Image (cartoon, coloured by chain):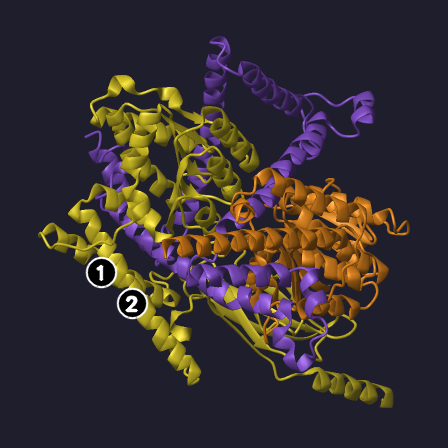
């Protein structure tokens, strides 16, 4: 029975070591667990695949470094699909650190697509404060909201920005969001007021709050939620990356946690039974 | 008087904000936004207070050679280095007082502030964030015991969501035919997150909202004065 | 001659084909500050593009927007002045970008004194406010009110006593949001009661803060608490100190304090985000008794798992009233409960109505 009592008081350092090993090893050696693509993620992919080559899409970087591990992989997968399908990306940020996230993602993806040219296939218009007010303004007068790119160059110099005066010429809006301002505001303005298709990527914690917007009215056409959503998207674009490896690590970590929960409960019931027997 | 004036200001401003929520006409329409702007300006200046306090507390501990005093030196040095780098050479978005030399740019690849931010600060933040993974495991091991029917329900729901949100869940129940798709672990996990979890969170939010209303009314009416230091 | 007749017929035909049955109206945008005009039209999808122009004198029109017929409305809020008449022209373009038709409309924007979209909000506010004020006055008249036990708050005195016996300090963390968050104010209200107990017991309290404004307020609260307890000399101004605005920098600092100072009791009362579990687990490891309270639904489970007592949502806001035991404040808690009852009834009625396809309650309660 002593072993069952030990189950109740496992030193947490043992738990930490096992979690460390469980998370680290799959990141080095991919285990390749089967991943299923869910409907919400498939909808995002289908929307982008359905756009004609040369269509411009708007990506809003509404997150920062703290949520980068969850959202950056989906950003990279989306950009990879866009460049493969010859879509053109207009990037903006409603969070200050979003500009940096955009630059890092573009740096990584453009290395694999040497034909992609800044100003023709991609542009980073930088950060603008104001959240919903900014989105509303963009929808009415894009050029005065973002008169220059992140480097301070007037947008008139860039072919990608030709004829962009509002949301009309955009194929869709993608908001990669970790909070407020973010996806909710894009749905309210870009879709509800101006009828543009909107898709989003959020953290796993935030995803349940955004799911009601994936409805018959298609306020959100689809939603990528957390690392799993990013991994599913990497599977769809056939470019496994950090999210796929991360899912293996996350799966193993969850199994370890469940194992310890079971051990704890076995110890609890075994010792409780013993106590009840002694009482009787 | 010392107590009366703040209470009067609180009552007046609080009532004004509530009333202005319903009146679009000038000057009420933009009142909330203006006051929020004032708050941001004041809190911007208040940052100086915080930094001075940081310096004062750390310098006192260093001068008294309090236990672990070298760490307080490191804190002040780190703070000063970031401020100096940011002020002198600026950041990627903002120019500094002096332009950065090509030699420095080639060496770091970034401006010094951005370099420290990217390679030290971001990694330290990520490290602290990653502690959650370890603590989550130890907290779950300790907390999820089937002591009662409610805790058993919590335990079962937690295990189902943990399995369903990962590839393990898809692998374990991938063989289930579509007609029994509701037994597929990812679907069960989605159901739990979408319905009971959302309902519970909304209930807490509604009650917290009521708590905010009650608390705010008490403060506006001057019944609660603890924030002023009073009883 | 024939050429001229043919030309006239062609021009007439092009106008006839292009002449669409389009209505164009301009009206004051309601429920605003008189700074917007709403333009509406109906145009067939075959129209490639339209231009909206604006003038204040009916003569000099300036283009303000180019739109496709997918849009049916446009809100012009660019430099609109209350009371000034504005004239609008909707110009329909053909495939070549030439204007083939024009429609005009005018409107005078007016500021409204009441936002009719918020009637439901006003009714709910008045109902809840009246309930709370009624019970405050009821309690003042001496009516006894039953408030259920909140274990976390009853343990405060025990926690302070424990800390005094062990000769260890108490740690109070007021969350990581600024003073504009009600949770921070609720936390600071509890700090006042706690600090008074600490002063009475001659114990030590540390209050690391994340925001400069919270620093000033917390310092003042603790100082006043020591004064009320008759121990102004015991107050240490450095016991309330600023760490950093950064979330993870702050939690690293607080964790360091917990591991070095080994407080006997930790209080986490305010707004928390991802750092909640890091704080609570570190505190658990140090062996302290932990009382937490937050209204963030995503963080409550972490506190419940790792702390001894947790104030969930409204309990945090009720804490100050509960601790003071003043009839005024307890009355407001009763009013909140009535508010809860009103919401529950509204929810149940709404669910039944929605099941039967009656949407008026949902439409009435939705804010725009």
Q: Quadrant of residue B13?
A: top left
Query: Which chain does tag 1 point to?
Result: C
The chain to which mark 2 is attached is C
At label 1, counting other C-alpha atoms closer than 10 Å, the crowd grade (few under 14, some 14-19, many 20 or more) is many
Upstream in sequence: badge 2 or badge 1:
1
Residue identifier under label 2 = C342
- In the image, the chain rendered in purple is B
Q: Position of residue C348 (x, y in %)?
A: 35, 74
Which residue is at the front of the view, C111 or C162? C162
Visible in this render: residue B130? no
* The quarter of the displayed image where residue C228 is located: top left
Residue C131, label in figure: 1
Q: Position of residue B167 (x, y in %)?
A: 70, 61
To which quarter of the image does residue C199 belong?
Answer: top left
Dots 2 and 1 on the same chain = yes
| Chain A, colour shown | orange
Q: Secondary structure at mark 1?
A: helix
Residue pictured at 63% horizontal, 47% vertical: A67
Residue displayed at 46% across by 18% down: B57
Measuring from the top left, give residue C318's x and y in whole percent.
29, 49
Q: Nearer the viewer, residue B196 or C128?
A: B196
Are dots 2 and 1 in contact, CB under 8 Å? yes
**Label 2 environment density (alpha carbons within 10 Å; few <14, some 14–19, many ≥20):** some
What color was chain C assigned in the picture? yellow
Seen in the picture, residue C341 relative to A158 is either above or below; the reply is: below
């Amino acid at each position: 029975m002593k072993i069952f009592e030990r189950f109740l008081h496992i030193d947490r350092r043992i738990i930490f070591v096992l979690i460390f090993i469980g998370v680290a090893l799959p990141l080095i050696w991919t285990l390749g667990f089967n991943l299923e693509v869910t409907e919400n993620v498939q909808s995002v992919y289908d929307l982008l695949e359905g756009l004609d080559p040369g269509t411009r899409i708007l990506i809003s970087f509404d997150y920062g470094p703290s949520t980068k591990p969850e959202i950056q992989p989906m950003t990279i997968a989306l950009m990879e699909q866009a460049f493969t399908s010859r879509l053109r990306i207009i990037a903006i940020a409603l969070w200050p650190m979003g500009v940096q996230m955009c630059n890092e993602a573009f740096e990584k993806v453009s290395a694999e697509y040497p034909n992609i040219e800044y100003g023709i296939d991609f542009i980073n218009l930088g950060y603008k404060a104001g959240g919903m007010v900014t989105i509303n303004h963009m929808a009415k007068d894009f050029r005065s909201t973002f008169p220059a790119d992140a480097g301070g160059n007037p947008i008139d110099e860039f072919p990608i920005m030709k004829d962009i005066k509002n949301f009309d010429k955009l194929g869709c809006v993608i908001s990669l969001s970790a909070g407020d301002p973010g996806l909710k505001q894009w749905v309210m303005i870009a879709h509800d007021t101006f009828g543009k298709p909107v898709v989003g990527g959020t953290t796993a914690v935030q995803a349940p709050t955004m799911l009601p917007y994936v409805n018959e009215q298609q306020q959100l056409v689809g939603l990528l939620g957390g690392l799993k959503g990013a991994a599913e998207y990497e599977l769809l674009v056939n470019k496994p990356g950090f999210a796929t490896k991360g899912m293996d690590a996350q799966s193993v970590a969850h199994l370890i946690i469940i194992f310890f929960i079971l051990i704890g409960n076995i110890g609890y019931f075994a010792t409780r039974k013993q106590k009840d027997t002694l009482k009787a | 008087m010392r107590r009366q004036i703040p209470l009067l200001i609180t009552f007046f401003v609080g009532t004004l904000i509530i009333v202005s929520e319903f009146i679009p006409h000038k000057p009420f329409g933009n009142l909330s936004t203006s006051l929020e702007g004032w708050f941001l300006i004041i809190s911007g200046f208040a940052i100086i207070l915080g930094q001075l306090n940081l310096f004062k507390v750390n310098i006192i501990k260093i001068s008294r050679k309090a236990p672990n005093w070298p760490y307080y030196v490191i804190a002040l040095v780190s703070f000063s280095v970031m401020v100096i780098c940011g002020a002198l050479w600026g950041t990627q978005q903002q120019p500094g007082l002096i332009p950065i030399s090509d030699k420095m740019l080639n060496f770091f690849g970034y401006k010094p502030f951005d370099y420290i931010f990217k390679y030290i600060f971001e990694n330290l933040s990520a490290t602290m964030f990653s502690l959650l993974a370890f603590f989550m495991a130890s907290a779950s091991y300790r907390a999820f015991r089937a002591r009662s029917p409610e805790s058993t329900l919590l335990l079962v729901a937690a295990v189902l969501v943990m399995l369903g949100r990962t590839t393990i869940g898809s692998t374990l129940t991938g063989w289930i035919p579509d007609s029994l798709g509701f037994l597929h672990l990812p679907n069960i996990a989605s159901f739990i997150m979408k319905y009971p979890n959302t309902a519970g969170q909304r209930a807490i939010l509604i009650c917290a909202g009521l708590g905010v209303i009650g608390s705010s009314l008490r403060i506006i009416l001057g019944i609660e004065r603890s924030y002023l230091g009073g009883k | 001659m024939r050429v001229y007749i043919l030309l006239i017929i062609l021009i007439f035909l092009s106008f006839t084909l292009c002449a669409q049955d389009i209505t164009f109206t301009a009206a004051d945008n309601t429920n605003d500050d008189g700074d917007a005009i709403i333009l509406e039209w109906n145009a067939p999808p075959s129209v490639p593009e339209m231009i909206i122009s604006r003038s204040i004198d009916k003569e000099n029109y300036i283009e303000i927007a180019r739109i496709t017929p997918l849009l049916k409305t446009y809100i012009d809020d660019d430099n609109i002045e209350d009371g000034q008449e504005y004239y609008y022209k909707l110009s329909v373009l053909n495939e070549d970008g030439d204007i083939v038709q024009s429609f005009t409309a005018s409107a005078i924007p007016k500021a409204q004194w009441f936002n009719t979209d918020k009637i439901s909000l006003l009714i709910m506010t008045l109902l809840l406010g009246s309930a709370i004020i009624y019970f405050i006055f009821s309690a003042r008249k001496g009516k006894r009110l039953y408030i259920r036990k909140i274990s976390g708050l009853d343990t405060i005195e025990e926690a302070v006593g424990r800390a005094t016996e062990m000769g260890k300090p108490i740690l109070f963390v007021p969350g990581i949001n600024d003073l504009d968050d009600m949770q921070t104010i609720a936390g600071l209200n509890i700090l006042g009661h706690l600090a008074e107990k600490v002063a009475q017991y001659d114990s030590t309290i540390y209050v690391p803060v994340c925001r400069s404004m919270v620093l000033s307020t917390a310092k003042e609260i603790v100082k006043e608490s020591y004064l009320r307890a008759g121990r102004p000399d015991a107050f240490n101004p450095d016991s309330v100190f600023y760490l950093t605005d950064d979330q993870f920098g702050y939690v690293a600092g607080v964790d360091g304090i917990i591991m070095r100072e080994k407080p006997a009791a930790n209080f986490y009362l305010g707004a928390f985000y991802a750092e909640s579990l890091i704080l609570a687990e570190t505190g658990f490891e140090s062996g302290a008794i932990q009382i937490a309270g937050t209204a963030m639904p995503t963080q409550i489970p972490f506190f419940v798992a790792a702390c001894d007592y947790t104030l969930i949502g409204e309990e945090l806001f009720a804490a100050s009233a509960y601790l003071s035991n003043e009839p005024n404040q307890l009355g407001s808690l009763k009013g909140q409960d009535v508010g809860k009852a009103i919401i529950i009834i509204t929810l149940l009625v709404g669910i039944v109505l929605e099941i039967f396809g009656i949407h008026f309650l949902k439409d009435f309660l939705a804010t725009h």
